[in-house]
């Protein structure tokens, strides 16, 4: 997590100040529940809230205590006792460190997910706006990087919209799955803490109770969360790579917005490079890189160990902060994307009509020509076009084997661009609704 690829709202979630504030709230809500159950005095719970709520926890002081006691939660509780006073002895009664750490981590992940969901909404809005703008802008579709048949630029963006819409649904599910709370004590048996304390803390922190914890919340939940972030990152890269390819000089059907004072190269003043798309391609690789450690965190020893802890201290902030930045940047790329319909048309015309070869193939078979023979007839004319000999339509009209089955007018009718775009409305209704 470095400032260059970070945004303040997301980084704030992972700051020590935020973490200690969440720890305090978990402890204070637990104290409230214990007071209601008669486990600790009500006046003590009240004073814990009064003295801790307005307090600023001293991160340097907590770090100094931890350097001595070698335990972060004990260091925090020691510092809180300096603020709260004698009533602090009632805090953490029957609880274990993981109750605080795991519940806090899930609070942070759900808050991060909320920001990411908003980011996805912004990406979706940009994609929808530009897709509708270019709904019927014809462009060449490519398979294996080679011209195939016509599509529209709006459809390219509609594909991406549908993909990110799925991403949003997956993240909503992952957020729900990870939004659990465990206040179950040592080895998760509730021997020292009443389950009603857990229920109260969960409600106050916007979580649900973990049905069964082993002193820690099961890490399959977190594995799925980070795997979802990894899939979203892959979708970011897929769209970024498309933009990068379309911006290549030989293609130049679309390009990133280039501001008035922007520089493309330290050596070559003419350069306009797809640096933003390249940037988020790299960031996507980083987010995916955090998925495997999250998967490996699932297998822990018995009721708990802390081999997952160091991993999560890194991947929690890094994955969410990086993905937040990448999604925000992607929304801007799409919103400001420069689109060149004239160049798209020039590229459509580049192969002199070969993009209609399948229509001629089908037309011949419908006239009684065997498919193998029809394919041979179309391909032999197509290969001449690849070699630079004339235009495809002219070659077909001059081929007696083709004209035996198709008249000149019938050949011409199969070079209609509108034929390829007749179902665009149908696809758009599927993606965006009526």
Image (tube, rainbow, N blue to C red):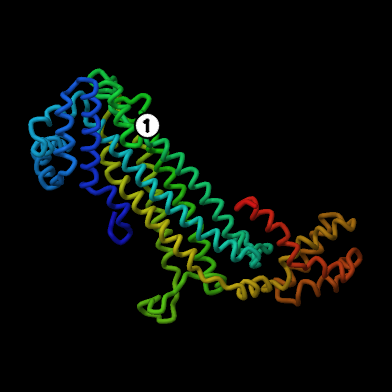
Q: Residue at x 55, y 58 (%)?
A: 128
Q: Please, is residue 419 above or below residue 41 in the view?
A: below
Name the quarter where the N terminus is drawn.
Answer: bottom left
User: Where residue 127 appears, x then y in whole percent?
Assistant: 53, 59
Hey, which quadrant is residue 40 in on the image?
top left
Q: Residue at x 58, y 57 (%)?
A: 158
The answer to whether 197 appears left or right of 340 in the picture is left
List the single residue furthest toward the bottom: 269
Q: Residue at x 49, y 63 (%)?
A: 334
List the single residue furthest toward the right: 404
Q: Secondary structure at mark 1?
A: strand
Hey, which quadrant is residue 316 in on the image?
top left
User: Where residue 209 appears, x then y in whole percent?
Assistant: 36, 28
The answer to whether 309 appears left or right of 372 in the picture is left
So how many labels did they put on this image? Answer: 1
Q: Please, is residue 235 above or below residue 255 in the view?
A: above
List the single residue furthest toward the top: 191
Task: Determine which residue is flagged by label 1.
Answer: 208
Q: Residue at x 21, y 47 (%)?
A: 17
User: Where residue 99 appears, x then y in whole percent?
Assistant: 26, 30
Q: Please, is residue 15 above or below residue 369 in the view?
A: above
Foreground of the two, 210 or 390: 210
Foreground of the two, 51 or 108: 51
**Is the residue marked by circle 1 packed among few (<14), some (14-19), or many (20+) residues within 10 Å?**
many
User: Where residue 434 appears, x then y in whole percent?
Assistant: 65, 52
């Amino acid at each position: 997590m470095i400032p260059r690829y970070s945004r303040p709202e997301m980084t704030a979630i992972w700051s020590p100040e935020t973490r200690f504030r969440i720890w305090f709230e978990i402890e204070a809500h637990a104290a409230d529940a214990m007071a209601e159950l008669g486990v600790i005095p009500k006046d003590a719970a009240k004073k814990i809230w009064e003295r801790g709520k307005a307090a600023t926890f001293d991160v340097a002081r907590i770090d100094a205590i931890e350097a001595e006691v070698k335990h972060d939660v004990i260091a925090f509780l020691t510092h809180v006792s300096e603020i709260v006073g004698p009533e602090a002895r009632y805090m953490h009664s029957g609880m274990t460190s993981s109750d605080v750490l795991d519940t806090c981590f899930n609070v942070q992940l759900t808050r991060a997910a909320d920001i990411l969901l908003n980011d996805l909404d912004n990406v979706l809005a940009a994609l929808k706006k530009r897709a509708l703008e270019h709904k019927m802008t014809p462009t060449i579709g490519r398979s294996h990087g080679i011209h195939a048949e016509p599509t529209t630029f709006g459809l390219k963006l509609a594909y991406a919209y549908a993909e990110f819409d799925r991403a949003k649904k997956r993240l909503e599910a992952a957020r729900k799955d990870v939004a659990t709370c465990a206040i179950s004590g040592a080895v998760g048996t509730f021997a020292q803490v009443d389950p009603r304390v857990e229920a109260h803390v969960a409600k106050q922190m916007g979580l649900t109770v973990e049905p069964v914890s082993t002193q820690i919340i099961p890490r399959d939940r977190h594995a799925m969360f980070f795997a979802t972030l990894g899939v979203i990152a892959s979708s970011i890269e897929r769209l970024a790579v498309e933009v990068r390819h379309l911006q290549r000089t030989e293609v130049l059907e679309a390009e990133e917005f280039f501001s008035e004072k922007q520089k493309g190269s330290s050596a070559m003043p003419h350069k306009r490079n797809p640096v933003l798309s390249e940037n988020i391609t790299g960031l996507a690789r980083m987010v995916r890189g955090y998925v495997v450690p999250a998967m490996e965190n699932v297998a822990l020893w018995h009721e708990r160990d802390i081999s997952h802890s160091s991993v999560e201290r890194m991947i929690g902030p890094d994955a969410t902060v990086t993905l937040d930045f990448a999604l925000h940047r992607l929304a801007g790329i799409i919103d400001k994307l420069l689109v060149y319909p004239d160049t798209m048309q020039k590229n459509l015309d580049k192969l002199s009509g070969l993009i209609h070869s399948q229509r001629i193939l089908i037309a011949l078979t419908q006239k009684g020509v065997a498919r193998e023979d029809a394919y041979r007839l179309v391909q032999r004319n197509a290969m001449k076009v690849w070699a630079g000999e004339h235009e495809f339509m002219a070659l077909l009209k001059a081929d007696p084997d083709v004209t035996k089955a198709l008249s000149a007018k019938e050949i011409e009718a199969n070079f209609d661009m509108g034929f390829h775009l007749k179902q665009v409305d149908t696809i758009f209704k599927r993606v965006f609704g009526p």
